[in-house]
Image (cartoon, rainbow, N blue to C red):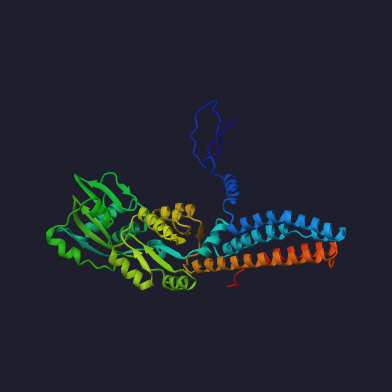
Amino acid sequence: MAKRPGAAVYAGSVVEEGNCTVRVTGGAGGNRYDRIVRMIEESERLNSGAENRAYDLADRLVPWCLGGSLLTLALTGNTTRAVSVLMVDFSCALKLSMPLSVLSAMREAGNHKITVKGGKFLEKLNQADTVIFDKTGTLTHACPTVGNVVPFNGNNAEEMLRTAACLEEHFPHSVANAVVAAAREQGLDHEELHSEVEYVVAHGIATRIGTERVIIGSRHFIFDDENVSIAPEDQELFESLDQRYSWLYLAIGGILSAAIGILDPLRPEAEQAVQNLHGSGFNRIVMLTGDSRNTAAAIADRLGLDDFRAEVLPEDKAVYIQQEQQQNHMVVMVGDGINDAPALSRADIGIAIGSGASIAREVSDIVIAAEDLRELVLIRKLSEKLMKRIDRNYRFVLGFNGLLILLGAFGILAPSASALLHNTSTLLLSLDCMTDLMPKR
């Protein structure tokens, strides 16, 4: 079959004549149907503990229901009474109401632009007692701006900003964008003088301009990993840097050349969200950030956080979560970036901000699409109401059906009445499970 430019070809196609250039648009396992199959395969693993307990209890009660019917027949010799007992079964209500409750809660979360990937995460969220926040992009809007440029080693501030923008323009990171935007606003054009740049995840950028190595990045990257030195005459200036900023450091030839102060304002709802999370039952709210300790301390104090860790690396976040879990804490991690992926995966419940990196959304258990941290409080309350509904369903199913069995065994209810009441109650309970848990906003 002849193929023209723009036509689709499939894996395994053979070119009989001529040549063709193929662009891959969908790899194995990447199309919609493959994803649906994976979700179905994972659905059992993602069931909540309440659902699994309901299935198990329903299965274990079947022999008891049959035994009760046989016992009634043996004691009374009345077939009608035995059939009345047999008409009542716990399995229907238990196996319908629990999954419907969970699915309805997940649907309701979706109405609030919150994606929950499995029922077990709502159950865990109800049990959680610790919330850990990343800072940039989570507690802040990830829309930083350059607030100050401090030159060192006799350099000029404009030239250092120009050099920093020359490196940072290659990477679509919010801080990099802020540096490039600041250079553009000041009319600082630049030529590509450097060689190929190397991006070190969660650290910074390294390249060469002429014969000198040029690096820009975090304090840990510059001073700990690269062992950059500070000119003696600049030591006092370095120590007096304003801690309101998150500092990005530029070094040329192994000597600190500039510090660029980044302002990343907090989300306006962050303080209220932290207060509400405390009020919803979380005992500890912690912030993990790569910023300096002084900057992190000022933010933690402003938000009323219980603890914080500064100058941490991505692997440090995961280690901290593991330490919390070893102390029997149920941990929720809230993040948005590539650097948060290990921590989101390690936490009992990983919650990603929808505007963040795709890998963060992929490894997380819950994704909040709405740009409002108060949605965390909403999903917490939703999980609490879900577990209360499930407990209520347990009590109703066991109590009401148990009563029907007793009434049937004593001959008060005919088989038809037992079947009608049992099925009607199951239907009404199932309909109730599909109603919203939260009031309309």
Residue 361, visible in the rendered structure = yes
* In this view, 435 is above or below 48: below
Using the image as rendered, state which of residue 159 and residue 256 is in the foreground: 256
* In this view, 23 is above or below 391: above
* Quarter of the image where one finds residue 390: bottom right
| Left or right of residue 198, residue 380 in this image | right
* Quarter of the image where one finds residue 292: bottom left
* Quarter of the image where one finds residue 68: bottom right
Using the image as rendered, state which of residue 13 and residue 106 is in the foreground: 106
Of the 4 image quadrants, the one containing the C terminus is: bottom right
Please tell me how many numbered marks the rendered image carries: 0
* In this view, 357 is above or below 387: above
Query: Which residue does the image show at 59% across and 68% down from the upper left?
Result: 385
Identity of the residue furthest to the front in this view? 75
Q: x and y percent of residue 128 in the render?
A: 49, 64
Query: Which residue does the image show at 32% across and 66% down from the upper left?
Result: 296
| Left or right of residue 209, residue 394 in this image | right
Of the 4 image quadrants, the one containing the N terminus is: top right
Query: Which residue does the image show at 50% across and 71% down from the upper left?
Result: 280
Residue 192, visible in the rendered structure = no
Identity of the residue furthest to the left in this view? 233
Q: x and y percent of residue 45 in the render?
A: 57, 51
Using the image as rendered, state which of residue 78 and residue 48 is in the foreground: 78
Q: x and y percent of residue 253 in the render?
A: 18, 49
Q: x and y percent of residue 228 in the render?
A: 20, 53
| Left or right of residue 73, residue 50 in this image | left
